[in-house]
Amino acid sequence: MMKIIILEDEKMFAEELKERICGLDFYNRYTPEIIICTGSEQLPESLSDVDIIFVDYKLGNETGMDVVRNIRQDNKDINVIFVTAYPEYVFDSFRVDTFRYLVKPVSDEDLAEALESYISRDVKHKVIRLPEKGKFRCFSVSSIMYLETEGRNSYVYTADEKYLSKKAINEIEELIDMQSFYRINRFYVVNFDYIEKVVNNTVILKNGRNMTISRNRREEFGKRYIKYLQSKM
Protein backbone atom coordinates (compact mmCIF):
# COMPACT_ATOMS: atom_id res chain seq x y z
CA MET A 1 0.00 0.00 0.00
CA MET A 2 1.16 3.51 -0.78
CA LYS A 3 1.89 5.63 2.29
CA ILE A 4 1.77 9.43 2.52
CA ILE A 5 2.75 11.64 5.46
CA ILE A 6 1.56 15.22 5.94
CA LEU A 7 3.97 17.10 8.22
CA GLU A 8 2.20 20.34 9.11
CA ASP A 9 2.06 22.18 12.45
CA GLU A 10 -1.36 23.66 11.63
CA LYS A 11 -3.58 20.65 12.19
CA MET A 12 -6.62 22.26 10.54
CA PHE A 13 -4.68 22.77 7.31
CA ALA A 14 -3.28 19.24 7.52
CA GLU A 15 -6.78 17.79 7.88
CA GLU A 16 -8.00 19.90 4.96
CA LEU A 17 -5.08 18.73 2.78
CA LYS A 18 -5.83 15.11 3.65
CA GLU A 19 -9.50 15.59 2.82
CA ARG A 20 -8.64 17.16 -0.53
CA ILE A 21 -6.29 14.30 -1.43
CA CYS A 22 -9.07 11.85 -0.57
CA GLY A 23 -11.33 13.70 -2.98
CA LEU A 24 -9.02 13.23 -5.96
CA ASP A 25 -9.28 10.48 -8.57
CA PHE A 26 -5.70 9.63 -7.51
CA TYR A 27 -7.01 8.49 -4.13
CA ASN A 28 -9.71 6.30 -5.67
CA ARG A 29 -7.10 4.49 -7.77
CA TYR A 30 -4.40 3.99 -5.13
CA THR A 31 -6.16 4.39 -1.74
CA PRO A 32 -2.97 5.44 0.08
CA GLU A 33 -2.63 5.44 3.83
CA ILE A 34 -2.35 9.10 4.91
CA ILE A 35 -0.73 9.98 8.24
CA ILE A 36 -0.78 13.46 9.78
CA CYS A 37 2.13 14.63 11.96
CA THR A 38 2.10 18.09 13.55
CA GLY A 39 5.81 17.96 14.45
CA SER A 40 8.91 16.01 13.48
CA GLU A 41 8.82 14.20 16.83
CA GLN A 42 5.65 12.45 15.63
CA LEU A 43 7.28 11.00 12.52
CA PRO A 44 7.59 7.19 12.46
CA GLU A 45 10.99 5.87 13.51
CA SER A 46 11.43 4.37 10.05
CA LEU A 47 10.29 6.07 6.85
CA SER A 48 11.47 3.29 4.55
CA ASP A 49 7.89 2.44 3.55
CA VAL A 50 6.78 6.05 3.06
CA ASP A 51 6.38 7.14 -0.55
CA ILE A 52 5.54 10.85 -0.23
CA ILE A 53 5.88 13.41 2.53
CA PHE A 54 4.16 16.80 2.36
CA VAL A 55 6.13 19.31 4.44
CA ASP A 56 5.49 22.91 5.47
CA TYR A 57 8.59 25.10 5.28
CA LYS A 58 7.95 26.62 8.72
CA LEU A 59 7.25 24.13 11.52
CA GLY A 60 7.14 25.97 14.81
CA ASN A 61 10.70 26.16 16.14
CA GLU A 62 12.17 24.17 13.23
CA THR A 63 12.13 24.38 9.47
CA GLY A 64 10.97 21.83 6.96
CA MET A 65 14.41 22.04 5.35
CA ASP A 66 16.09 20.87 8.57
CA VAL A 67 13.62 18.01 8.92
CA VAL A 68 14.11 16.89 5.33
CA ARG A 69 17.91 17.07 5.69
CA ASN A 70 17.67 14.66 8.62
CA ILE A 71 15.33 12.39 6.68
CA ARG A 72 17.69 12.34 3.71
CA GLN A 73 20.48 10.90 5.86
CA ASP A 74 18.59 7.59 6.01
CA ASN A 75 16.10 7.84 3.16
CA LYS A 76 17.21 9.07 -0.25
CA ASP A 77 14.11 7.86 -2.09
CA ILE A 78 11.20 9.48 -0.27
CA ASN A 79 9.48 12.09 -2.45
CA VAL A 80 9.32 15.48 -0.74
CA ILE A 81 6.58 17.96 -1.60
CA PHE A 82 6.80 21.31 0.19
CA VAL A 83 3.46 23.02 0.80
CA THR A 84 4.13 26.48 2.15
CA ALA A 85 3.22 30.16 2.15
CA TYR A 86 6.86 31.15 1.51
CA PRO A 87 7.65 31.15 -2.24
CA GLU A 88 11.03 32.80 -1.62
CA TYR A 89 12.51 29.50 -0.34
CA VAL A 90 11.83 27.49 -3.47
CA PHE A 91 15.46 27.50 -4.63
CA ASP A 92 16.71 26.46 -1.19
CA SER A 93 14.47 23.43 -1.39
CA PHE A 94 16.41 22.09 -4.38
CA ARG A 95 19.30 21.31 -2.01
CA VAL A 96 17.33 18.43 -0.49
CA ASP A 97 16.12 16.97 -3.79
CA THR A 98 12.57 18.30 -3.54
CA PHE A 99 10.04 16.75 -5.91
CA ARG A 100 7.54 19.64 -5.86
CA TYR A 101 7.23 23.05 -4.18
CA LEU A 102 3.59 24.13 -3.86
CA VAL A 103 2.69 27.61 -2.63
CA LYS A 104 -0.42 28.13 -0.51
CA PRO A 105 -3.23 28.39 -1.35
CA VAL A 106 -2.77 25.21 -3.37
CA SER A 107 -5.34 24.45 -6.05
CA ASP A 108 -6.76 20.96 -6.51
CA GLU A 109 -5.26 21.02 -10.02
CA ASP A 110 -1.73 21.61 -8.69
CA LEU A 111 -2.20 18.97 -6.01
CA ALA A 112 -3.45 16.41 -8.53
CA GLU A 113 -0.63 17.26 -10.95
CA ALA A 114 2.02 16.70 -8.30
CA LEU A 115 0.60 13.31 -7.29
CA GLU A 116 0.01 12.14 -10.86
CA SER A 117 3.52 13.23 -11.82
CA TYR A 118 4.90 11.13 -8.98
CA ILE A 119 2.96 8.11 -10.23
CA SER A 120 4.11 8.58 -13.81
CA ARG A 121 7.76 8.28 -12.78
CA ASP A 122 7.32 5.62 -10.12
CA VAL A 123 6.81 2.17 -11.68
CA LYS A 124 6.13 0.65 -8.25
CA HIS A 125 2.69 2.24 -8.20
CA LYS A 126 2.04 2.72 -11.90
CA VAL A 127 -1.23 1.24 -13.10
CA ILE A 128 -2.17 0.25 -16.65
CA ARG A 129 -5.69 -0.31 -17.94
CA LEU A 130 -6.52 -3.06 -20.41
CA PRO A 131 -9.93 -3.45 -22.07
CA GLU A 132 -12.17 -6.28 -20.89
CA LYS A 133 -15.70 -6.84 -22.25
CA GLY A 134 -16.47 -3.17 -22.77
CA LYS A 135 -14.84 -2.13 -19.50
CA PHE A 136 -11.26 -1.78 -18.29
CA ARG A 137 -9.16 -4.04 -16.10
CA CYS A 138 -6.50 -2.29 -14.01
CA PHE A 139 -3.11 -3.84 -13.26
CA SER A 140 -0.35 -2.52 -11.05
CA VAL A 141 2.78 -2.71 -13.21
CA SER A 142 4.75 -4.07 -10.27
CA SER A 143 2.33 -7.00 -9.98
CA ILE A 144 3.02 -8.20 -13.54
CA MET A 145 5.38 -11.16 -13.50
CA TYR A 146 5.63 -11.62 -17.25
CA LEU A 147 3.85 -11.14 -20.57
CA GLU A 148 3.31 -13.83 -23.18
CA THR A 149 2.29 -13.45 -26.81
CA GLU A 150 0.14 -15.96 -28.64
CA GLY A 151 -0.91 -15.07 -32.16
CA ARG A 152 -2.56 -11.66 -32.08
CA ASN A 153 -3.39 -11.93 -28.40
CA SER A 154 -1.31 -11.57 -25.25
CA TYR A 155 -1.43 -12.93 -21.74
CA VAL A 156 -0.61 -10.94 -18.63
CA TYR A 157 0.62 -13.09 -15.75
CA THR A 158 0.66 -11.96 -12.14
CA ALA A 159 1.51 -14.12 -9.14
CA ASP A 160 -2.19 -15.01 -8.80
CA GLU A 161 -3.78 -14.97 -12.22
CA LYS A 162 -3.53 -15.19 -15.99
CA TYR A 163 -5.35 -12.51 -18.01
CA LEU A 164 -6.10 -12.66 -21.75
CA SER A 165 -5.64 -9.33 -23.52
CA LYS A 166 -6.67 -8.48 -27.07
CA LYS A 167 -3.78 -6.03 -27.22
CA ALA A 168 -0.57 -7.11 -28.93
CA ILE A 169 2.39 -7.59 -26.62
CA ASN A 170 4.22 -4.62 -28.11
CA GLU A 171 1.22 -2.40 -27.28
CA ILE A 172 1.39 -3.49 -23.65
CA GLU A 173 5.15 -2.88 -23.64
CA GLU A 174 4.45 0.75 -24.55
CA LEU A 175 2.27 1.11 -21.46
CA ILE A 176 4.73 -0.23 -18.89
CA ASP A 177 8.11 1.05 -17.76
CA MET A 178 10.57 -1.14 -19.64
CA GLN A 179 13.42 -0.33 -17.27
CA SER A 180 12.18 -3.17 -15.06
CA PHE A 181 11.14 -5.46 -17.91
CA TYR A 182 12.99 -7.14 -20.75
CA ARG A 183 11.84 -9.08 -23.80
CA ILE A 184 13.99 -12.21 -23.60
CA ASN A 185 12.62 -13.78 -26.80
CA ARG A 186 9.80 -13.29 -29.30
CA PHE A 187 7.25 -14.78 -26.91
CA TYR A 188 8.05 -13.45 -23.43
CA VAL A 189 8.65 -10.17 -21.60
CA VAL A 190 9.82 -10.73 -18.02
CA ASN A 191 9.81 -8.49 -14.96
CA PHE A 192 13.28 -8.45 -13.38
CA ASP A 193 11.65 -8.29 -9.94
CA TYR A 194 10.34 -11.84 -10.37
CA ILE A 195 13.53 -13.51 -11.55
CA GLU A 196 14.76 -16.09 -9.05
CA LYS A 197 17.99 -16.78 -10.91
CA VAL A 198 19.59 -17.06 -14.32
CA VAL A 199 21.28 -20.35 -15.19
CA ASN A 200 23.31 -20.38 -18.40
CA ASN A 201 20.80 -18.94 -20.89
CA THR A 202 17.66 -19.76 -18.94
CA VAL A 203 15.62 -17.38 -16.79
CA ILE A 204 14.00 -19.07 -13.81
CA LEU A 205 11.13 -17.09 -12.32
CA LYS A 206 10.03 -17.17 -8.69
CA ASN A 207 7.04 -19.31 -9.61
CA GLY A 208 9.38 -21.93 -11.10
CA ARG A 209 8.69 -21.07 -14.74
CA ASN A 210 11.73 -21.50 -17.02
CA MET A 211 12.27 -19.39 -20.15
CA THR A 212 15.12 -19.40 -22.65
CA ILE A 213 16.85 -16.16 -23.61
CA SER A 214 17.21 -15.81 -27.38
CA ARG A 215 20.76 -15.95 -28.67
CA ASN A 216 20.61 -12.44 -30.15
CA ARG A 217 19.28 -10.99 -26.88
CA ARG A 218 21.66 -12.60 -24.38
CA GLU A 219 24.33 -9.90 -24.33
CA GLU A 220 21.85 -7.04 -23.93
CA PHE A 221 19.88 -9.00 -21.33
CA GLY A 222 23.07 -9.53 -19.30
CA LYS A 223 23.86 -5.80 -19.33
CA ARG A 224 20.34 -4.80 -18.38
CA TYR A 225 20.00 -7.40 -15.64
CA ILE A 226 23.35 -6.49 -14.05
CA LYS A 227 22.33 -2.83 -14.09
CA TYR A 228 19.04 -3.77 -12.44
CA LEU A 229 20.79 -5.79 -9.70
CA GLN A 230 23.21 -2.92 -9.03
CA SER A 231 20.27 -0.52 -8.59
CA LYS A 232 18.96 -2.75 -5.80
CA MET A 233 22.20 -2.71 -3.78
Image: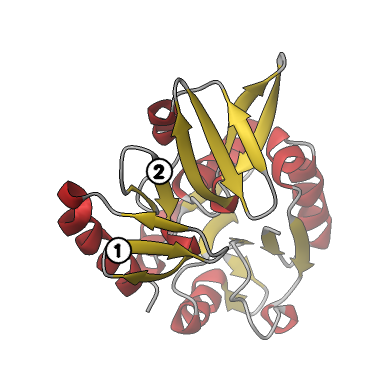
Residue 110 image offset from top left, x and y in percent: 57, 36
Give the left or right position of residue 81, taking residue 227 as reference.
right
Determine if residue 117 is in view: yes
Instruction: Give me the disc on residue 184.
Output: none
Instruction: Give me the disc on residue 225.
Output: 1
- Mark 1 vs mark 2, foreground winner is 2
Quarter of the rendering occupied by the C terminus? bottom left
* 113 or 180: nearer the viewer: 180
Give the left or right position of residue 152, taking residue 22 as reference.
left
Residue 86 image offset from top left, x and y in percent: 53, 54
Residue 186 image offset from top left, x and y in percent: 32, 37
Image point (24%, 49%), residue name: 214
Marks 1 and 2 in Cβ contact (< 8 Å) = no
The amino acid type found where label 2 is placed reads Tyr
* 112 or 14: nearer the viewer: 112
Nearest to N terminus: mark 1 or mark 2: 2
In this rendering, the count of numbered labels is 2
Determine if residue 106 is in view: no
In the rendered image, the vertical position of residue 158 relative to residue 51, given as above or below: above
Image point (60%, 52%), residue name: 143
The amino acid type found where label 1 is placed reads Tyr
Crowding near the residue tagged with mark 1, few <14, some 14–19, many ≥20 C-alpha atoms within 10 Å = some
Q: Quadrant of residue 230?
A: bottom left
Quarter of the rendering occupied by the N terminus? bottom right
Which residue is under mark 2? 188
* 188 or 11: nearer the viewer: 188
In the rendered image, the vertical position of residue 88 relative to residue 129, given as above or below: below
Which secondary structure, mark 1? helix
Image point (55%, 35%), residue name: 155
Residue 202 image offset from top left, x and y in percent: 33, 62
